[in-house]
Every structure is written in C-alpha cells, then in structure tokens.
Image (tube, rainbow, N blue to C red):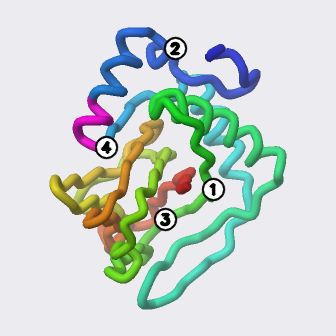
Amino acid sequence: MNKKENNSIKINSSYFERENIKLIKENFIKNRVIKLDDFLDKKSYGILSGNLKNLTFIAVKKPDKYSFALATTSSGLMKELDLLFCRYLSSIMEKEVKFNLQIKRFSHTNYIIIHDEEFKSKKTVYEFVFYLAGKWDFDMGGNKVLRGKKNYVITPLGNSLVLTKLENGTNSFSQYINYKAGKNSFMVIEGTN
C-alpha cells in the first residue's frame, strides 16, 4: 500500500514498516483488539482536527441506548476518510472490509449503553474508533469498554486508533461522561462493518 495515496491526510509512516505491520497483525489476531497511538502524522492530525471542528453536529438521543452528537458530513470527506482508514485496516486484517463511517462528538452527559439482544448474534463484527481529543482523563468517563473473554477499558487519546473484533459474547459501550469533563469534549471517527 502506498502511504501517500491520500494527499492531504497521511498515516504515520512507522505503521507501514514491514516489522510493525507483522506485529500489529499478530497482536490483533491474538487479542482481537489493537490500539495504535500517533496513528496519523502530526501535521495530518492537525489538518483533520481542524476540518472536523468546522462540521455541523446534531444531537441524537435514545435515553435507553445512547446520547451523542452526530456530524452531518459531505460525501467527499467521508470518501476521503473511507480510503484512509478502510484500506489500511483491510491490510491489517488481510481481507477487504468495508466500514460504515460516522463522526460523533461526545461531551458531558453522553454515553452508549450495552444492549444484550444486540450481542446474541453469532455474527463477527469489526469496529474501529479513531479519537480526536485534547487532554482527557479516565475519571471524566467516556472510556470505551470492551467486555468478553478479556476486558479492556480504553481512555480517549487524541490521534489513536482502536480496531476491535467483536464476536459472540463480546460487547462494547462508552461510559457516561460525567461532570468532571466540564466543557471538554472529544470526537471519534467510528466504523463498523
């Protein structure tokens, strides 16, 4: 894969090094989850953060399921993000995977709740989350929780990408963002297949 396929936003070149790709694949197969910090090069992360701050977000809420703000985006931006994330992640998974992308913003009082009926299916689902966040503390909430054979709690960290394989018996949710977050918020680019 040519790391310069996207002219404006580039993945950190270290993630294209053969040995790193091998380690990422091995860890993903073993753990079913992988977190890649400093995923984009520094300049690209700044460009993407700036572009996403200019989006319009609308509040979406189902009290017994979720609460967050969803971006209304142009098809051009989504196509660019699709190329950036899906091609790289497909190379890690060694198969073509198409993700449905959304851009969400989380702030005080936002959450995503587990619903057991959604996880009784034996279907395997791949999901990724790319975080765009400033300083975020675990105690603020908003942490991504993965529960299954192994449990993981992932605190939002700007410019980090988390890829997860959700299988029967594995579920995920985002913790309630509490008052400690104050006026802070973070955005995610999220993809599920």
Q: Residues within 10 Å of mark 4 (few under 14, many from 20)?
A: many
Give the Cα distance between marks 1 and 3.
19 Å
Q: Which of the two discs, 3 and 4, sits closer to the camera?
A: 4
Please state the total of marks drawn on the protein image.
4
Q: Which mark is residue 100?
A: 1
Q: Is residue 133 above or below residue 17?
A: below
Is residue 23 left or right of 40 when viewed as pictured?
A: left
The residue under label 4 is which amino acid type? Val
Query: Which amino acid, mark 2?
Result: Ser
The residue at the point 35 percent across, 63 percent down is 142
Indicate the quadrant containing the N terminus: top left, top right, bottom left or bottom right: top right
Disc 2/disc 3 C-alpha distance (Å): 29 Å
Mark 1 vs mark 3: which is more N-terminal?
1
Between disc 2 and disc 4, the foreground one is 4
Residue 28 lies in the magenta-colored region = yes
Task: Describe residue 93's horizontal placement relative to residue 54 as left or right.
Answer: left
Residues drawn in magenta: 27-32
Within 10 angstroms of label 1, few (less than 14), some, or many (20 or more) residues? few
20 or 62, which lies in front? 20
Where is mark 2, residue-wise?
A: 13
Residue closest to the eye, 115 or 48: 115
Q: Which numbered disc covers residue 33?
A: 4
